[in-house]
Image (cartoon, helix red, strand yellow):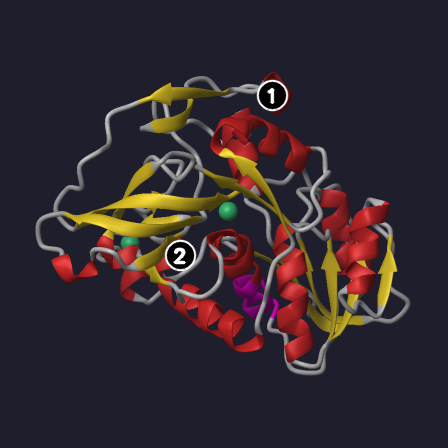
Amino acid sequence: MRAAVLHQPAPIASRPLAMEDLPVPGPGAGEVLLKVEACGVCRTDLHITAGELPSLRDSVTPGHQIVARVEKSGQGVESSRIGGRVGVSWLGGVDGTCPLCRKGRENLCDHPTFTGYSVNGGYAEYAVARADFLIPLPSDPSATDLAPLLCAGIIGFRSLRVAEVQPGDRVGLFGFGASAHLAIDVLKSWNCEVYVSTRGESHQQLARSMGAKWVGGATDRPPVPLDCAVTFAPSGDVVLAALASLRKGGIVAINAIHLDRIPQFDYDRLLWGERQLRSVANMTREDARDFVALAAKIGIRPRTTVFRLDQVNEALLAVAEDRIDGAAVVVP
Ligand SMILES: [Zn+2]
Ligand SMILES: [Zn+2]
């Protein structure tokens, strides 16, 4: 099979992924072999490929927004699952036994499996995944429309939960890439007022066209105090801009696995008044089920730019350079 392989992390512009011919992997016990239909590009793939997250293996195939058909079932997996359409996201498995798993917080598991990071992911013709972490998907939408829902969508949705968004709230979205452009549809379905701060004229225009009440630059403060905000840009300056936009008691959820740094800030002015700063780590299977169901109900259709598998380096570069409105998707 054709697969994109990262041997040595390097700047995205140096096109670090190598296209290789590899044997089709066999599913182990409790696993399935998947024939990949599409795989979305996530900012985390950039951090892995560029080495901003530490390498966990000698080589890895990234990609963790996989839409696929079950091709083969491993030992202990019902063969009736063969042919079914499923999704695989970032959380590829947990131990189920650590203290956090036992408290229902599997997103924080001490021994997690991360798709396309600790195990091979979806920038390939085939992938192997744990059967109990497959996300059932509807059969109607195209694979390229479903792929961005699987991390950008699910973790964006989790971010809204972490920010404790209530219906009708004034909500800030700082950054308007793949994740935010899916979150805005959820917020509109909850009758929220959405304020978007983002760089790039085309991202700003997309936010306006999708119903943002106000749109400004990356660190601009909305004209009214916000009930809560989610930051998507991997920038500590943006986090502080979001914090400065909150009313008392408001919450900022940081949807970023990696931040450059958070500058020193003034506690009295920015955090006092029971304002909260929270990170959003990974996702649970419940988040995945709830978001996929909601997306089907309200009819979320991402804006996508599709790349062939052998163009995967170009896809990563386009996301890194903010040239994609919506989400980039790779198709084998
Ligand atoms: Zn992701
Ligand atoms: Zn655990």
Residue 260 is at least partly visible in this image: no
Find residue 11 and name its label.
Answer: 1
Q: Residue furthest right?
A: 223
Q: Residue at x 46, y 44 (%)?
A: 39
Decide whether the magenta segment is chiefly helix, strand or loop. Answer: helix
Residue 216: image x %, image y %?
Answer: 87, 56
User: 45 left or right of 170?
Assistant: left
- What residue span does the magenta drawing correspond to? 157-163
Name which residue type carries label 2: Asn
Q: Residue at x 37, y 44 (%)?
A: 36
Q: How many neighbours does mark 1 have within 10 angstroms: few (below 14), some (14-19), or many (20 or more)?
A: some
Using the image as rendered, state which of residue 167 and residue 108 is in the foreground.
167
Residue 208: image x %, image y %?
Answer: 83, 62
Residue 79: image x %, image y %?
Answer: 13, 57
Name which residue type carries label 1: Pro
Q: How many neighbours does mark 2 have within 10 angstroms: few (below 14), some (14-19), or many (20 or more)?
A: some
